[in-house]
Image (cartoon, coloured by chain):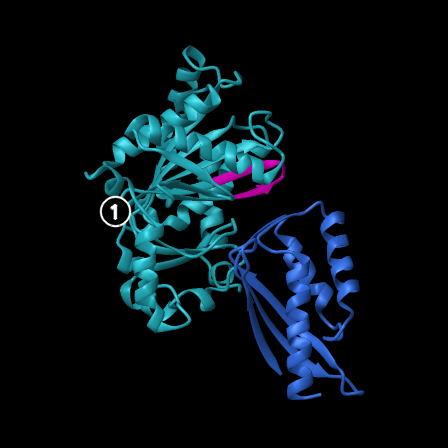
Chain colours: A blue, B cyan
Amino acid sequence: MRYTFDYKDERSKLVRFDVEIIKDKDNNGVIKSVMITGDFFATPESIISLFESYLKNKPVCFGSKKVEYDLAKIVKEKNATLIGIRPDIIVKALAYFCERFKKDGA
Amino acid sequence: MSLDDSLLGQDLDVVDKKEEKVKVDKKENINFQSDNSWRLLITKTDSYKEQMAIDEANMEAIASGDSPPIVRVCYFKKPSVSIGFFQSVFKEVDVALCAKEGVEIFRRMTGGGAVYKDPQREINYSFIIPERDERVSLNVVESYKIICDAIIKGLNEEFGINAVFKPINDIVVNNKKISGNAQTRREGVILQHGTILLDVDYDKMFSLLKIPDEKIKGKMISSAKERVTSLSRELGRTVSFEDAERAIIRGFEDKFNVKLILDKLSRKEIERARFLYKYKYDTKEWNFWK
């Protein structure tokens, strides 16, 4: 199943998500691929690919606190600067995809 | 005009002669070793993609210690749509309409949004400086303000308008955007490039960008008139490229207390920019990778 989610708030730029979710043997949703796009800024640019790699193969209904912690850790490790995109936005997107998956195909 | 006829296509023997002349000039008059002399480059190209390649070549020249900080004024001929580094071209741009109208699409190495680039109605600059230079800041948000201040100074002093900085990366007049700016950092070098609007074609601005709902396109155009302005609109007269170029130069000289010395791209920069244009900025792999 493929889903999209666009997010924008007063402090963020437009952040757009495209995901493909597949079912594992226990019918749980697993993120097969994810693409994060938008008009935000991030230095180094590779940080967004690292976010995408981190999310790939994770259960879509993964614990939100854990995701936010892990993403913040990646930001710190890479000494990255994010403008208009934040780890909590990615958590919000995952929550949306989790709900959609539960509704559509779990 | 093809690449062969444009700045990057120039005969390198001629470039060598120009370099020799610049070397003589430098020896006699210019000390680029001084912290107060920066390079001023005026680059005229056919495609804006060539300017992207020159940006990266300039960054590399500074990273390797071959160049002092650079202020570049960029001119181009082909109308184009520029998308931010992280944007999806298919989500943001009407690719088919661009092809039909002969409008180029290119991806910047900086973040930010998609914009229509009109060679007749805007002037562009690039500023490249080592991150460690104390006149800028290691902090990205702070450095936007510092560098935009140069543009603001130039606009206000040259045209008597009241341009101010609007975080994170805009310059506004009467709360309307007149200049958009974007920054990236590689190998300890900052690149900030930006656009100053001399005039605006509000309809064209949105016609090539994808708006989720066609019904709101009209609203977006009228809202853009409230949010976006230009030098011509603010001054009630046409503003020439020469005047705008002078404002940019004056702004950087005054803000950073430096002298900008007119220079040429070196042979090495041209060769590198040619390579980057051919194998990166003019490729589908780069421009359509998302």
Give the percent coordinates (x, y) of residue A37. Answer: 55, 62
* Residue in the foreground of this view, choosing between A106 and B258: A106
Q: Amino acid at mark 1?
A: Gln
Residue carrying label 1: B120
Left or right for B133, reference B248:
right
In the image, what residue occupies the spot 44% across and 65% down? B92
Residue B139 colored magenta? no
Indicate the secondary structure of the residue bearing disc 1. Answer: loop
Q: In the image, is residue A81 above or below residue A68?
A: above
The subunit carrying tag 1 is B
Give the percent coordinates (x, y) of residue B127. Answer: 47, 35
Quick check: can you spot residue B271? no
Which residue range is magenta in the image? B183-192
In the image, what residue occupies the spot 64% across and 57% down? A48
**Label 1 crowd (10 A; few <14 / some 14-19 / many >=20):** some
* Residue in the foreground of this view, choosing between A28 and B233: B233
Q: In the image, is residue B14 above or below residue B32?
A: below
Residue B185 colored magenta? yes
Q: In the image, is residue A87 above or below residue B238?
A: below
Quick check: can you spot residue B248? yes
Majority secondary structure in the magenta region: strand
Left or right for B283, reference A68:
left
Q: Quadrant of residue B19?
A: top left
* Residue in the foreground of this view, choosing between B163 and B149: B163
Give the percent coordinates (x, y) of residue B83. Answer: 45, 56
Q: Quadrant of residue A12?
A: bottom right
In the image, what residue occupies the spot 26% across and 40% down? B234
Give the percent coordinates (x, y) of residue B82. Answer: 41, 55
